[in-house]
Image (cartoon, helix red, strand yellow):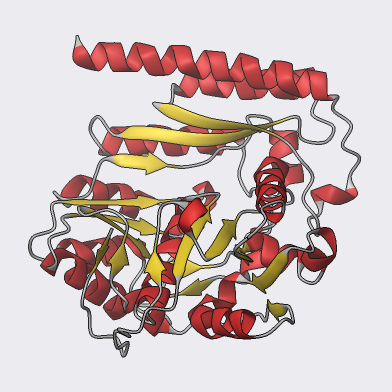
């Protein structure tokens, strides 16, 4: 871990207030949010620890994208609540926003619930929870203060995640993100560059730009889109590697591929989730493209970015998914030959449109399809890796 002294209005508090352990569950966006929380608490005098047994406070930074992620949190809370001298327990992130007051009813040991938009006040809420017996609930929906991204705290010494946008406007029918992280909000380009410069000045040479959909990035004056943002960040002297995730196919254009080709420090890697190879299922998912359009986009990417890597996400067992639908997904994976792919079994998420549909694909079928697609991708990944090293 390292703490960069970046001027952002935060003064280091030398009075020690206790030790904090943060368990991060979910994607890189959650990883960066945990770093932000660590930075905010560190400057207020809290000590970060990697050992939950030594912590006075345990915070779960949570994910609600899949049921399995939530079950890990409930299980972790249960283990802590049985300790004789249990620490203060807090729930941050998507589960906090999704379940709100219900968390206190389901897990009486929880003392603090703080949603994604409220983490800029985490030190205040934690102090309140430590001082009194009442539960603390903070789940308002608003825009975070920009300053929280300038505490300069990163877990890795040579890599930094930098958020370029928050929330999402896509409303894919299976996805809870817009309901727990709000509508799409873009950070100012100059602030992103300032954060990148501070990281590089501190010795970090590798940066990953983060967003639920970075391809949709656009400044308020509509002048700077994502390819232009890549150019601005790439100009930071001393930066050796620049990558980004995630790109939604419907917003990913030729200009991005050209920027990847032309900017030397940009890693030739694209994560572009397909989710399904069935046009019928893609329409039900509200993805905004067909399998044919996705394949054409892949062909364009590979024609522009020489030896560019490609990864994807897939969901099997979406409501009403037939064997024919699954075979279409299988054929897409087989035909595109991704370098890697994350494959998930569908689970209904509260508030989403898909949750209104019957979850009618049997668990046994989901497991079989998951295993079959996983095995296919494993074979492809090994084959591509072997070809590159041969």
Where in the figure is residue 271, as x and y percent of width and height?
42, 42
Classify the position of the N terminus by image quarter.
bottom left
Indicate whether 45 appears above or below 311. Answer: below
Residue in the picture at 23% in, 17% down: 388
**Of residues 306 and 269, which is closer to you in this image?**
269
Query: At x 67% / y 85%, what residue is drawn?
Result: 132
Q: Residue furthest left?
A: 237
The quarter of the picture where residue 268 lies is top left
Q: Is residue 280 above or below residue 15?
A: above
Residue 172 image position (x, y, % from top left): 68, 53
Q: Is residue 25 left or right of residue 379?
A: right
Q: Front-most of 324 and 357?
A: 357
- Asked whether residue 118 appears in the rendered view, the answer is yes
Q: Is residue 142 left or right of residue 31?
A: right
Q: Residue 302 occupies which quadrant of the picture?
A: top left
Q: Position of residue 143 (x, y in %)?
A: 54, 82
| Residue drawn at 35 percent across, 38 percent down | 301
Q: Is residue 236 left or right of residue 370?
A: left
**Viewer-closest of 328 and 147:** 147
In terms of depth relative to the viewer, which is nearer, 36 or 217?
36
Locate the C terminus and report the quarter of the image it occupies.
Answer: top left
Residue placed farthest to the front in the image?
84
Q: Is residue 30 visible?
A: no
Give x and y (percent) for residue 168.
58, 64
Taking the spot 26% from the left edge, 61% from the top edge, the residue there is 230
Q: Is residue 45 left or right of residue 350?
A: left
Q: How many marks?
A: 0
């Amino acid at each position: 871990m390292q703490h960069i002294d970046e001027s952002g209005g935060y003064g280091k508090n030398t009075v020690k207030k206790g030790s904090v352990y943060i368990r991060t569950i979910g994607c890189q966006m959650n990883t960066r949010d945990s770093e932000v929380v660590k930075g905010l608490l560190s400057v207020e005098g809290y000590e970060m620890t990697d050992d939950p047994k030594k912590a006075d406070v345990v915070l779960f930074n949570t994910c609600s994208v899949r049921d399995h992620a939530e079950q890990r949190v409930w299980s972790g809370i249960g283990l802590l609540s049985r300790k004789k001298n249990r620490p203060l327990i807090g729930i941050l992130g998507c589960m906090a926003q999704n379940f709100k007051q219900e968390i206190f009813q389901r897990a009486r040991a929880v003392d603090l619930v703080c949603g994604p938009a409220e983490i800029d006040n985490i030190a205040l809420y934690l102090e309140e929870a430590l001082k009194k017996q009442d539960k603390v609930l903070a789940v308002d929906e608003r825009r975070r203060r920009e300053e929280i991204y300038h505490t300069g705290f990163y877990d890795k010494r040579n890599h930094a995640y930098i958020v370029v946008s928050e929330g999402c406007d896509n409303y894919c029918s299976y996805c809870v993100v817009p309901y727990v992280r709000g509508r799409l909000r873009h950070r100012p380009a100059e602030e992103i560059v300032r954060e990148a410069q501070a990281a590089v000045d501190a010795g970090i040479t590798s940066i990953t730009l983060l967003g639920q959909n970075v391809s949709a990035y656009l400044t308020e004056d509509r002048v700077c889109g994502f390819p232009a943002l890549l150019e601005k960040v790439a100009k930071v002297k001393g930066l050796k590697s620049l990558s980004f995730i995630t790109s939604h196919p419907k917003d990913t254009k030729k200009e991005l591929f050209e920027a990847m080709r032309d900017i030397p420090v940009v890693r030739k890697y694209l994560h572009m989730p397909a989710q399904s190879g069935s046009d019928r299922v893609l329409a039900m998912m509200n993805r905004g493209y067909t399998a044919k359009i996705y394949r054409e986009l892949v062909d364009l990417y590979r024609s522009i970015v020489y030896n560019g890597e490609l990864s994807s996400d897939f969901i099997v067992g979406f409501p009403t998914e037939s064997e024919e639908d699954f075979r279409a997904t299988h054929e897409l994976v087989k035909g595109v030959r991704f370098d890697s792919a994350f494959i998930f079994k569908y689970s209904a998420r509260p508030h989403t449109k898909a949750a209104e549909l019957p979850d009618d694909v049997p668990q046994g079928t989901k497991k079989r399809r998951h295993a079959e697609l996983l095995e296919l991708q494993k074979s492809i990944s090994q084959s591509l890796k072997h070809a590159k090293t041969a």
